Image (spheres, coloured by chain):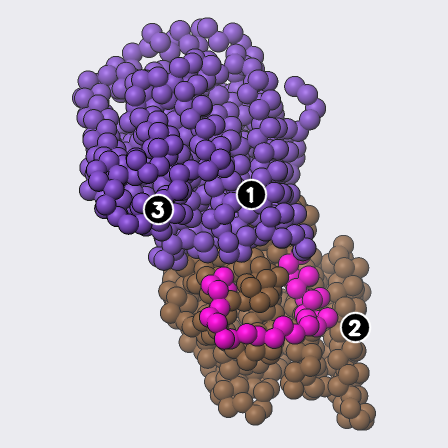
Chain colours: A brown, B purple
Amino acid sequence: MNALFVILLPSILFTASVIVILLDAFMRDSTRATYSFSLLVLAATMLVSLCLWEKQGTAFDGMIVLDSFSLVVTFLFCLAGLVMLLLSDGSPQSTSQFHCLVLLTLVGMILLLSGTHFLVIFIGLEILSLSVYVLAAFAKEDPLSAESGLKYFLLGSFASAFFLYGTAFIYGAAGSLQLNVIAKSITYPDFDGQIFLFLGVIFLLIGYAFKISLAPFHMWTPDVYEGAPTPVTAFMAATVKAAALASLLRVLVVALPSIYSFWSPLIWVLAVVTMFWGNLSAIWQDNLKRLLAYSSIAHAGYMLTGLLASPEQAQQSILYYFAAYVFMNLGAFTLVNYMERTRGVLNISQYQGLAYSRPALAVCLTLFLLSLGGLPPTAGFFGKFYLFRAVLQAGNIWIVIFAVINSAISFYYYLRIVIAMFTPEKEGAPVAASRLSLPLILTLVLTVWGTVSLGLAPGFFLEIARAASILH
Amino acid sequence: MTGIPILSILVFAPLAGALIILLWKNADAEMIRNVALGVSLLVFVLSVPLYFGFHPQTVGPQFIEKLSWIPSIGVEYFLGIDGLSLFLVLLTTFLTPLCVLISWNDIKLKTRQFFALLLMLETGVLGVFVALDLFLFYLFWEVMLIPMYFLIGIWGGPNRIYAAVKFFLYTIVGSLLMLVAILFLYNFHQEQTGVTTFNMFQLYGSALPAHQQYWLFLAFFVAFAIKVPMFPFHTWLPDAHTEAPTAGSVLLAAVLLKMGTYGILRLAVPLFPDMAHKFAPVILVLGLIGIVYGALVAMVQTDIKKLVAYSSVSHLGFVIVGIFVFNEQGLHGAILQMVNHGLSTGALFLLVGMIYERRHTRLISDFGGIAKQMPVYFFLFLIVLLSSVGLPLLNGFVGEFLILLGGYRAGIWIALVGATGIIWGAVYMLWMFQRFMFGPLDKEENKRLKDLDAREIGILVPIILAMFWIGIYSNSFLRKMDVAVSESLKSSTKSSPVGAGLVPARTVVPEQGSQQATTRVAPAKQ
């Protein structure tokens, strides 16, 4: 089998990141050049992933796979990377090293979500994590950012250790690190190394839970999200946890379907705890980045419920939810970033009067927040609708009830922001309206388009999500 | 049927109007008001043919529009109206222009946004009444929350944010649980028949196991009961009403609350007829408690707006009772009472808004002797008040009479308790009126009050005419409901939904249906 096209996408991105580094080393003032180059590369990667749509295959003795599922997710990741670069444009962090790290992160993500061998998955996870640690600490002069990077690094390494330990146990039990081989060697319920397999799965789940920021392994998330530069936060919230979740989905669906009855209660508990913890903590936040951090934890919880659906439904509905989430979350962060950059504000109370000084932006932010809450006719609503439908179809009624209760709770804090924006500003605090920059307009148009069209005309993307499949 | 998608035009014309208002940069307040009035009047004019074109003897929905929307999960764009929804649609289109007019001078802040939201609200509400696809219904049901939330939250009274959030969260909790029920029903229907659909009429036939019906009925019913609001889910209502601007209160009382009762009639009862019967005694008792409780609490209010708000709880208790006695009189009365309450309570809020605009207080004790100072106001208020307490020749009488008649046939205790509710209603209304209108004109501010101007009279007169029309010639309304009522009873009195099949639109002679309904012994009879 021709292996080249399987690893084409990560290769493009990796080569590009090397070129960026070289440009940085040999060119004076390379920032503009690497910025445009990275944008181009990301756009090209998206294009290539579209061209590869009908293809699927494996490479390196089945260690890496290319299937329509990984293509869709890759496309969305590149989109998020693109938005992130646009957001960071003009900030002091936007340097060549920064661009290189973004590309490397994407390489890690693609390896992570298309790895079908624990070794590749781990390498992907580490490339991803190491790049993101540095990105989180990239605002060098800001002590919060440095703290954020260090915290993320320490806890992340801890999680990686858990992950490795888990894979070791699984290897001991199943005799392989290859996902589909593991699946074949597990014969539940009469299975020799059962206890080791179970231990391995638990450790593996803990490792993933750190990366996806599931409660109670989410403690790092608010601090890291708050300290990291806002574009990085947006990128992390949209993609890092989704990449880990996509990989977890692949592991569970491909390698461990036969012990569904073992891991499904674990997922159930993790999902419920995560949803409640995320939402209930978000209520008390005044800092918007922290609030969105907790809200992203809650959203990870919703997505996790999708794993309880039948494998095919799980992958479709998580994919749809994920696409919706990328658009609405990036949209919200775009505006938070704008407010931080132009007015230096992050607190909800400082958003007061935005609806009158900047009506268009306030309407956009309202749209994103209501979509995050899940109000029709937005992407967030249809994502939840489709997800809950799938989970319900598999007979899990209680978790869906918990999930909708959580949606109701989440409206409380999303509405707090909306209220603030629409409360008239006190006299004597006029804010000079600056012109909106082109990247801002671009990202807003893109994210608004996604949020509205995935909600009003879900048909098209639904077809893609249904066509996307995981190669076993 | 003609090929013109009249319902789509009705639903989306207000939205288009709202967009025009929002995007027309150079329009001043005057222009915006004119556009809003023009669009809402146009929608009303367009809705009039519905009344005349509505065929009273056709079973099933009319003016149908059906398009595929998300085929892979069976979602359709499916609109239509029948005897249940016809008058609610007309009520909405009738009241919206009046709401625009009442806000004419009242809204000075953010005029553009206010009228845009008002029109968006009309879109949402009309959508709920005409959607026959469950997905679409749910969509409009929730979309409607946003404009109302902003109307209360931005232009409301001092406590507006609390009221707006409370309104939003109460409704959303109920509707999200309903969403779970909708999904469950949809999945069940798919497993049973292999057909993926959200078409309400096809889902009517689902033969769910009893214990599942139990929970699903509760999920649907509670979502609607919160909206109605039925005792004990009513606590959001006084806050929302008191804080909302006049136009918001009018639409909230007249139209939004009807979405709850409409939902019960359209979904909760026909989807789960067995459970509806099983729960009927409990619901009847709660409805009766609502009637008496609402009236008693209204009596002790010092704020007129709160008084009217609590009177809504009482009046809607009647509607609930009318639905759950499951006989023809009761149901006729319930549907008519929905319209009646819309007219009379809407008019009461308009009247309260007019006096508030002049005096900026709503405390009854701040007034007294107004009758001498504002004779026209006094006279119009009197008519509206008499309609609200159910004086014969006016609309309120017909509805309440029919409901009590239905109640009597189901069990004499229902009629007895219900009748005391009417008495209490007369007591609190007349007592309020006495303190408000008569007595010495002793407050300085009140001596300077101006009587109603032409605009204000023009707002009230159409409503009062409608009140007389219903009161004197109610048959012109009841006739159009006949088929819907008998169909609804037929589907709700099936002992078992198994094999009920689908209920597509078909034309039959209605006689047999209505005769069956009249001769049937009321099932709620113990």
Can you tell which of label 3 and label 1 is closer to the viewer? 3
Visible residue check, residue B352: yes
Question: Magenta residues?
Answer: A421-449
In what element is the residue under mark 2? helix
Q: Say if the magenta span includes residue A437.
A: yes
Please tell me whether mark 1 sits on a helix, a strand or a loop: helix
Q: Identify residue type, mark 3.
A: Arg
Q: Is residue B253 left or right of residue A340?
A: left
Marks 3/1 in contact by CB < 8 Å: the verdict is no
Residue in view at x 75 percent, y 65 percent: A46
Q: Which residue shows up at 42% across the image and 72% down it?
A: A286
Q: Label 1: chain? A: B
The residue beneath circle 3 is B448
Identify residue for label 1.
B119
Task: Categorize mark 1 by other alpha carbons within 10 Å: few (<14), some (14-19), many (20+).
Answer: many
Drawn side of residue A45 relative to residue B448, left or right: right
Where does the image place residue B97, in percent across and percent down from the top left? 53, 36
Q: Residue at x 58, y 59 (%)?
A: A363
Look at label 2 and name its amino acid: Leu
**Residue B362 belongs to the span the image colors magenta:** no
Q: Position of residue B65 (x, y in %)?
A: 63, 28
**Can residue A125 be seen at all in this image of the molecule?**
no
Instruction: Identify residue for label 2.
Output: A40
Disc 3 to disc 1, C-alpha distance: 35 Å
Give neighbour class at mark 2: few <14, some 14-19, many 20+ (Cα, 10 Å).
some
Dot 1 amino acid type: Leu
